[in-house]
Image: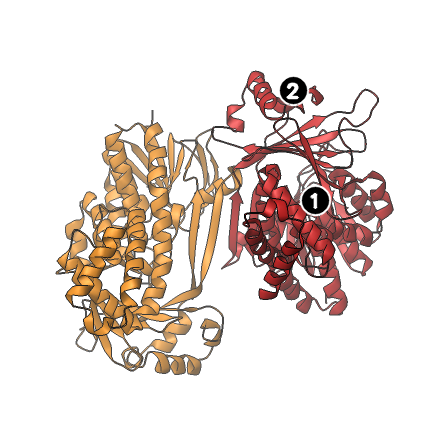
Chain colours: A orange, B red
Amino acid sequence: MVKNIIVSGAGPIGALLSLNLAKRGYNVKLLERRADFRSGTLYAGRSINIALSDRGWRGIEQAGITEEICKIAIPMYGRYIHNLDGSTVYMPYGKDQQAIYSVSRAAINITLLNLASQHPAIEVLFNQKTNQLDLSAKRLISEDTQTGLIHEHQADLFFGSDGAFSGSRLSMQLQHDRFEYQQHYIPCAYKELIIPPDIQGGFKMEKNALHIWPRGQFMMIALPNPDGNFTCTLFLPAEGPVSFSKLTTPDEVMQFFKREFSDAVPLMPTLCEDFFNNPTSSLVTVKCYPWVFKNTLALIGDAAHAIVPFYGQGMNCGFEDCMVLSGLLDRHREDWSVVLPEYQRLRKPDGDAIADLAIANFYEMSASTADPKFLLQKKIEARFAELHPDKWIPLYSMVTFSPDLRYSEALRRGNVQQAIMNQIMSRPEIESEWNQHQIETAILEALNDV
Amino acid sequence: MVKNIIVSGAGPIGALLSLNLAKRGYNVKLLERRADFRSGTLYAGRSINIALSDRGWRGIEQAGITEEICKIAIPMYGRYIHNLDGSTVYMPYGKDQQAIYSVSRAAINITLLNLASQHPAIEVLFNQKTNQLDLSAKRLISEDTQTGLIHEHQADLFFGSDGAFSGSRLSMQLQHDRFEYQQHYIPCAYKELIIPPDIQGGFKMEKNALHIWPRGQFMMIALPNPDGNFTCTLFLPAEGPVSFSKLTTPDEVMQFFKREFSDAVPLMPTLCEDFFNNPTSSLVTVKCYPWVFKNTLALIGDAAHAIVPFYGQGMNCGFEDCMVLSGLLDRHREDWSVVLPEYQRLRKPDGDAIADLAIANFYEMSASTADPKFLLQKKIEARFAELHPDKWIPLYSMVTFSPDLRYSEALRRGNVQQAIMNQIMSRPEIESEWNQHQIETAILEALNDV
């Protein structure tokens, strides 16, 4: 009988999971390695933005904090492309009022953590470094990094929601025979920069869009914050001819930015200070298997499937893990011996799919959005999807606005659709006939052949 | 200036590396986590056999122990295939007297370790568990697992030769940003069994061959030992309809063996005892990058590239690492700042290649060797290679008998040759015309088209 559960890692996923479990009547101990970041500096000076989309909103809703998060969420209805020559193009993400939402990760985490701390069935402990996790004895030994005191915790079940560099997962890599594990870094690293508000406190660019400066092997993006700021992120190879390793002086930085992002430079008064003060961070993808061990430990969120941020799905996917788990607990009447293997069986292919989709989307954002052919393809797809909404949902919409569709199914359908579009785009007259009847017919026929 | 070097892991690779370095005038400390296995039980009851081939012999030669190892090495000139119906087929590995050699891993390791211990510039320390490796401070802290005493070691350079589950590599996984890492288990696990000598102490099967019972998804192999034993290894999926998980009683084991390896069963009087006494072990492939960190730590052998055993190249490849390193030290006059990056640049593609070749060879050994078409292809290749030795070396010979050819080049050429053979084998009359002039001509033409 499962009664006491330990959740390791008090990020947004761990906090939401704890709340869900506590509401079901379990006693939850939520352990966090770091200090309490509600008063601390974890998020200070770092306005990490989340692009919250439909899958993530479901988690927000389940926690009952939709109203609160709505107040600080800025809808982004499309991509605002900044070309090298200073021209701009706007591409809606979906139809009508479909949007993704720029929200501060800190705000979501803190809101969820406050709720967790107030719940009588949840005990939150900070500064707890896990020294040992013994699944046979169902015992976790932690060390308080402030006091040096050793704590021994017993539980019936453990969750590892401790992120991309999960200690729970590492202990399985070291202890569990036949553990499949893979960590891969893409060539790009990233650095956060800022576009502050104008003198009246207003936004210096279109507020309700995600801004992209696509430059092929690299790009910059910007997301709006409620205080009038934009958080900019430069994604650039760590090494190579055009890379972070070549930007070592203020002159080099200014030259690079003036050449590549000339329209942004006047909006970034603290560019050089920010560039040299802010860290350069790497982007890792982690795939592993199994996610469930001895029916006693389960990995969830980034701990199970760390992905790169280019689809804006990291936290959305982790929240969906929590939702799927809740659904399985309902369906199988809290029989964990059925729920955990089912959770793993269902979610592993979806974690793999969104990991691959996220890497592919880097190329779409950084290269294709600057390509007129790509923009035309998007227009054709949007037109056909409007005419035949039952037959075609663009891949981006399947991932972002279709939370009932599994990531793995979105990937499968997306591949089919891309093969069809490759045919369509290779027609010699496509630029003139793109909105003609024969294109609609050709797509319909290709769909019938699938 | 590099003067003092620490080598972690006193297996065959670590011992050979230490000897090579000591001969060049470096002071070497060779640390081993386990107890001194010359008196201990590490190898007791486990007669792990190495199939030593040309690349490995070079290492043996450099250590000056050729004569000693020759005495205990049994040449295997070919594969001896045991079919399900009891029939057998013999396939030579190469031409003339080309052979691979069955040698005890323990014998090689102990011989090398004795040499290392006797060298005045090498200090060998056992029972040393590495607690910390600080590359910036060039300091390694070890704990003596017998006494509990903590030792601090300084060195100018560190080598990690600590095997497939390398602690040196793990510390890089945890400390080094952008460390690429992948561990993959194949479905098959393995278990060692034995065919003891006959009552006169003689071999019960052909001595100078590697015996294979190929059965598609699984297989058994047997290698001769000087005392008249054969060490058998059963490779079988860990889970599934035909798997270790289904062999839980002596009855199930006997039934399985009688069905699949009927000619071997009478030769294995202790089959059931051995089956349940001996462990079932997993087979891991590890790929990682980089192999060299801050020009202060380098991984070598299985620590850098753990591979499955189906090409018999694990130790051969590790010895080759040592030879390549020696060659680079000669060429670059012991300038380690050049040697280490070059070592990594040269060996990483070869480590990847032999890892992939080793996995592919499982399918060749377990499935193809039972296929008449495959046997015919081998005959055609052998015939053509004899007619045109400058134009064609069969893949197995490139890997095993051509130590001047890099693994990566062998893989590349092997793929080209396989594509040609696919064409040749698809000729409708191939079974009757295989040794005719037109086949030779067709292969020559295909080679010209490459």
Helix, strand, or loop for circle 1? loop
Q: Residue at x 24, y 53 (%)?
A: A447
Q: Residue at x 55, y 19 (%)?
A: B252
Point out residue B10 in the picture as x, y percentages from the top left corner: 72, 46
Q: In the rendered view, tell whether residue B162 sits above or below residue A235.
A: above
Work out which residue is located at the far top of the displayed protein and give it: B251
Work out which residue is located at the far right of the displayed protein and give it: B67
Is A106 or B162 nearer to us in this picture? B162
Q: Quadrant of the N terminus of chain A?
A: top left
Q: Are marks 2 and 1 on the same chain?
A: yes
Helix, strand, or loop for circle 2? helix
Point out residue B436 in the picture as x, y percentages from the top left corner: 66, 51
Quadrant in which residue A441 is drawn: bottom left
Q: Residue at x 69, y 38 (%)?
A: B147
- The answer to whether residue B89 shows anywhere in this view is yes
Marks 2 and 1, Cα distance to the nearest angstrom?
32 Å
Report crowding for label 1: few under 14, some 14 to 19, many 20 or more residues within 10 A (C-alpha): many
Is A140 or A297 nearer to us in this picture? A297
Q: In the rendered view, tell whether residue B250 sits above or below residue A448.
A: above
Point out residue B160 in the picture as x, y percentages from the top left corner: 65, 52
- The answer to whether residue B132 shows anywhere in this view is no
Judged left or right of residue A226, residue B380 is: right
Is B244 or B32 nearer to us in this picture? B244
Q: Residue under label 2, please give it.
A: B273
Point out residue A242 in the picture as x, y percentages from the top left corner: 45, 75
The amino acid type, in three-letter code, at marker 1 is Glu
Q: Residue under label 1, please give it.
A: B32
Report crowding for label 2: few under 14, some 14 to 19, many 20 or more residues within 10 A (C-alpha): few
